[in-house]
Amino acid sequence: MTEQKRKPEKLTGVKGMNDILPQEAGLWEFFETTVKSLLRSYGYQNIRTPIVEHTQLFTRGIGEVTDIVEKEMYSFTDALNGENLTLRPEGTAAAVRASIEHNMLYDGPKRLWYIGPMFRHERPQRGRYRQFHQVGVEALGFAGPDADAEIILMCQRLWDDLGLTGIKLEINSLGVAEERAAHRVELIKYLEQHVDLLDEDGKRRLYTNPLRVLDTKNPALQEIADKAPKLIDFLGEASLAHFEGLQRILKSNNIPFKINPRLVRGLDYYNLTVFEWVTDKLGAQGTVAAGGRYDPLIEQLGGKPTAACGWAMGIERILELLKEEDLVPEEDGCDVYVVHQGDAAREQAFIVAERLRDTGLDVILHCSADGQSASFKSQMKRADASGAAFAVVLGEDEVAKGEAGVKALRGTAAEARSEQQTVALEDLTEYLINAMVASAEDGDD
Ligand code: ATP
Ligand code: MG
């Protein structure tokens, strides 16, 4: 009897954690390039912290009674040394931890930015994943409303640079601790009068984090939340002046905004300014960026009291918007695809490809799937499919004569010269560069 070979089981990725495949990667790179150049233009510096932190950083930094700490963190015990660790659910706590740990704030304020994956155990759905990506900024050491305004203006400029329209700004002020405490008393009194109508979340938060009841998404609770005592009515003079200062700068820079008294943000560390950028084009997950001021956090994490504000942006949601609005930039193929046949030609092809790369051209060198030399016809098919602008053809004859064939594969250059040209190997680089420049100019017309 022949032994039956068992096929190994197929493996899949973790639910809610997505692969970004090559056909999507171009869009990610477009976003990353755009956002990095924007961040540079405002003088922000990149900080890169580990994916894993001590769990305590988040329980202390984000707050015990938040969605993240209550139910969304990927926490585990290091099997080797028993440490309690967590995959970072957001970027602010770690950026602040690193700033304190490395004494970064001793010589004055810092403007920082980060980008990377974050992890939250949520129910996966459109715009909500378990591994998702954020880019964020933290302006550390600036107490006035000009820093709040600056980080908001940056977002507007990013939307403009990306070509996105219809992302709306909502702002609110959470005041300072004493103002929130006074409001909390009234809010709890009010919610107690309606306790029968609250949902499970609302009842749970009534005494632990009643402010969060205000940003409920439950349609049945909208009226209760709308009529609840507003924090803004409890603000003192200083908080109001800060809030008005921000609004003045926004107005003088023509940034439209709406004051949303129910905007409270999920994390505990916010005070004074909070804001969100919201679109109605993404269904339920319409907040693309969110942030505000978190003056108490640095001291809470063991640093010297230092004012701070920042925002975080959900990259998946922005990319979804770019697709939704048909703003995905066209992908360029590489510049040159080198086809070759025969041993001598293959050797020459490597040299030619490296020389072209020396000049800055992007080059794919044909490599067969089975290790055998493929026909020119099938290699040319590959060249075409690669999206390259030009094919360079090296056969035994060409190599013997010190020549190469060049064929334009794309655009106007291809129409004008669909015939293969013969070019001396020593002139090849110059010829291709000139041809690239010419076809780019044609394309501009
Ligand atoms: P929500 O109320 O939607 O849960 P949040 O208050 O938890 O949002 P933040 O912690 O402020 O969100 O994160 C900032 C941004 O990161 C959000 O506005 C969103 O664009 C994005 N984001 C947050 N969680 C996720 C997720 N699970 N998947 C994809 N993007 C996310
Ligand atoms: Mg959340």
Image (cartoon, rainbow, N blue to C red):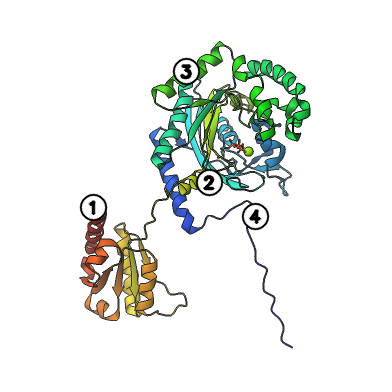
Reading the chain from its start, which is encountered first: label 1 or label 3? 3
Query: Residue beneath label 4, please?
Result: 14
Query: Residue beneath label 2, please?
Result: 316
Q: Compute the Cα span from label 2 to label 3.
A: 32 Å
Reading the chain from its start, which is encountered first: label 1 or label 4? 4
Q: Compute the Cα span from label 4 to label 2.
A: 17 Å
- Element on which disc 4 rests: loop
Q: Compute the Cα span from label 1 to label 4.
A: 48 Å
Nearer the observer: mark 4 or 2; the answer is 2
Reading the chain from its start, which is encountered first: label 2 or label 1? 2
- Element on which disc 2 rests: helix
Q: Amino acid at mark 3?
A: Gly
Tag of residue 445 = 1
Q: Is residue 394 left or right of residue 222?
A: left
Nearer the observer: mark 3 or 4; the answer is 3
Q: Amino acid at mark 1?
A: Asp
Query: Residue beneath label 3, please?
Result: 245
Nearer the observer: mark 1 or 4; the answer is 1
Q: Compute the Cα span from label 2 to label 1.
A: 34 Å
Q: Are marks 1 and 3 in contact (CB under 8 Å)?
A: no
Q: Amino acid at mark 2?
A: Glu
Residue 147 percent across, percent down from the top left: 47, 25
Mark 2 crowd level (few <14, some 14–19, many ≥20, 10 Å Cα): some
Residue 128 image-quadrant placement: top right
Mark 2, ligand 1, within 8 Å: the answer is yes
Q: Residue furthest bottom?
A: 1
Reading the chain from its start, which is encountered first: label 4 or label 2? 4
